[in-house]
Amino acid sequence: MTALTIQTLAPERDAVHLGRTLELAQRGSGRTSPNPLVGAVVVKDGRPIGEGFHSGPGEAHAEAAALGACGEDPAGATLYVSLEPCAHHGRTPPCVEAILAAGVERVVIASDDPSAMASGRGPELLRGGGVEVGWAGEEVARSARLLNQPFRKHALTGRPLVVFKSALTLDGRVATRTGDSRWISSEESRARVHRWRAEADAVAVGIGTAIADDPLLTVRVEGAVEATRAPRRVVFDSRARLPARSRLVQSAADAPVILICSPAAPRAAREILAAAGVEVIVSEGEDEAARVGAGLDALGDRGVQSLLLEGGPRLGGAFLDAGEIDALRVFVAPILAGGRDARGVLEGRGVASIADADRALAVEVERIGDDTLIDARVREW
Ligand code: AOF
Ligand code: ZN
């Protein structure tokens, strides 16, 4: 929306239908990337006559799906939609054309679409075509924006949304003083992480974790998701030390591995990894935080909208210093490790005073087995 856009604010009763569009949108969860989650409802004489949602790239947009599902003529109806209708020819034709052709009288939108080809063009064309356009109030709008944080951050900044995940002891350690960390969180908690992996476009670790744990970073969940979507596996490894015999490199042919190193990484090491099927990206920047930003730009360029950052404390600290942690999900296990040298969740430079510390915008808590999962949102897009 530009400052010039004339808005009509949707009345209270519209909030019910808009709420329904958000429910419908969530039916596409985990399947629409790089596209957003979108839901739509067509309402005539106060009754819903058609509903739809977006189920994946190349599939109908929510608006077209809802219009197509109408049990009666949508002429004169109101279309409620969770994201502003598109005006572009992409994998599917513009929704604005379908809405105008159907003779819809009014369109009520829950949230804006900040991507370059949208950004208010659709609503403008609808108004030009004589359709009344209304926008949701702030509360519904925020809920709608929260559905599409990866899509929005990527559209606004070119970088993926970063969710940092960790498992810690009750006294805040992610490993004992000897580095042992198997396992801090319960089996149920670890199963949850696999679900998050399945929903993410990419999963990342630092070289310290890659060497210490030799992780595979693949999705191992019961159900169908694993067969259809495998997140790209990313290692932040400034000197390209990832061993050629690591499980990550050994499985590079089965699921993509991306290694992000600095220009200082030895050419020979880079070439060995590239020859083994790893995509090696050189990320420039003065310090680690700058290289994190450049690495995220490179991932964004490759269509990665969401990144699950799985540690360790050193890489997590670099992300924090770079201002690039959008959310944290920490499992707190009811065990005590102690030890001055046992590492905490985030290292890096950190802040000097509490007054300068980032504060989470929203925190949710859930019990998972004996663990407590804290899901904190730090930035909203
Ligand atoms: C969707 N689903 O329900 C709506 C979208 O390549 P296309 O044609 O599928 O276009 C994708 C873009 O269309 C998407 O990035 C968003 O800006 C806009 N709206 N997209 O996938 C939908 N309404
Ligand atoms: Zn569309």
Image (spheres, rainbow, N blue to C red):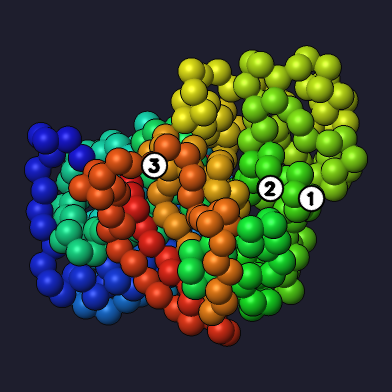
Q: Is residue 16 left or right of residue 293?
A: left
On the image, the x and y values in percent for residue 64 come to 44, 56
Asked if one can make out residue 14 in the rendered structure from this viewpoint, the answer is yes
Which tag, 2 or 3, sits closer to the chain's start? 2
Q: Quadrant of residue 15?
A: bottom left
Q: Which of label 1 and label 3 is nearer to you?
A: 3
* Residue wearing tag 1: 214
> Badge 3: few (under 14), some or many (20 or more) residues near its Cα, within 10 Å?
few
The type of residue carrying mark 3 is Gly
Label for residue 209? 2
Instruction: Name which residue type carries label 1.
Output: Asp
Residue sitting nearer the eye, 116 or 296? 296
Mark 1 Cβ inside 8 Å of ligand 1: no
- Mark 3, residue position: 350
Report the residue at 48% width, 64% height from top. Answer: 172
Q: Is mark 3 within 8 Å of ligand 1?
A: no
Dot 1 surroundings within 10 Å: few (below 14), some, or many (20 or more)? Answer: some
Tell me whether circle 1 and circle 3 mark residues in contact (CB < 8 Å): no
Q: Identity of the amino acid at label 2?
A: Thr
- Residue at 85%, 47% (x, y): give it: 247
Q: Residue at x 48, y 69 (%)?
A: 171
